[in-house]
Image: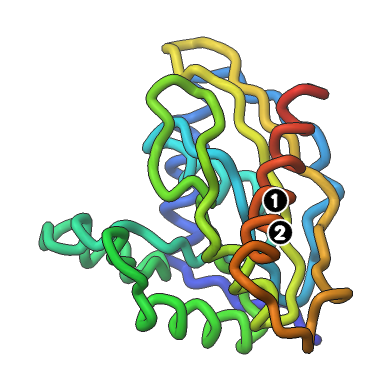
Amino acid sequence: MNKENISLFYRTVRFLVNVIINIFYRVEVHGIENIPDIGPFIVCANHISYWDPPLIGCLVKNRQIHFMAKAELFKIFLFKNILLKLGAFPVKRETVDRRAFKKALHILNEGKVVGLFPEGTRSKTGELQKPLNGPALLALKSSVPILPIAIKGPYKLFGRIKVAIGQPISFKDFEGQKIKGEQLSQLSYKIMQEIAALLWNK
């Protein structure tokens, strides 16, 4: 499988954002070698700031991440055009968005990378929140691994931000099985436990 072709717009924005982040923050990264070079996977990270998606996009240098972003952002004309050009797609958080789920599956089936935040929204305290079942269900339906990422802030001007990237998680043992709600919740918590372990070990 060949490496993904990344758009010039994505590369340009990533370069500019990378410059900004390195000027205003001190980023310490562990586990960069765990990022797959080829093949589809799902990025799952804790969410503490609006800076999380661009930061992750800068760290995963060899791939383009297609982030699932809240639908409200796509109602703003300027943001909508930029987000779409960056490969992001909208999700309605207040309901089960089947359209967004199918879009994510399509991206993964093309061998690309999807970015999700299992908590569904930013944590104002920095503490991990209860996970949604979407990422685990997507991993089961697509048969692709999850790449856990832990971000420890806060994003204070010229402050240190620590990022830990774990080894990919596979749910292959559960593929083909009829997963009930309770089991799906357990798999969702497993994702958050992996992220929590990365936070504690940094």
Q: Position of residue 30 (x, y in %)?
A: 80, 33
In terms of depth relative to the viewer, which is nearer, 129 or 45?
A: 129
Vertical order, 16 against 13 (above or below)? above
**Residue 43 seen in this snapshot:** yes
> Closer to the camera, 148 or 9?
148
Q: Position of residue 136 (x, y in %)?
A: 64, 65
What's the distance in space between the residues labelled 2 and 1, CA to CA?
7 Å
Quarter assignment of residue 27: top right
Secondary structure of residue under mark 1: helix
Give the foreground label among 2 and 1.
2
Q: Dividing the image into 4 quarters, which one contains the N terminus?
A: bottom right
> Is 144 placed above or below 115 here?
below
Q: Quadrant of the C terminus?
A: top right
Determine the residue positioned at 80% across, 69% down: 171
Crowding near pointer 1: few (<14 within 10 Å), some, many (20+)?
many
Determine which quarter of the picture holds residue 112.
bottom right
Residue 3 x/y as whole percent:
73, 77
Please state which amino acid type lies under the numbered disc 2.
Answer: Leu
Quarter of image, res 151:
top right
Closer-to-camera residue (144/18): 144
Location of mark 1 (residue) = 191
Q: Are marks 2 and 1 in contact (CB under 8 Å)?
A: yes
Whether residue 24 is visible: no
Residue sitting at x 59%, y 21%: 161
Identified by mark 1, the residue type is: Ile
How many residues crowd around disc 2 within 10 Å: few (fewer than 14), some, or many (20 or more)? many
- Residue at horizontal 47%, vertical 68%? 8
Label 2 element class: helix
- Residue 81 position, x and y percent, is 22, 67
Q: Is 114 left, or right, of 34 in this rendering?
A: left
Residue ID for mark 2: 187
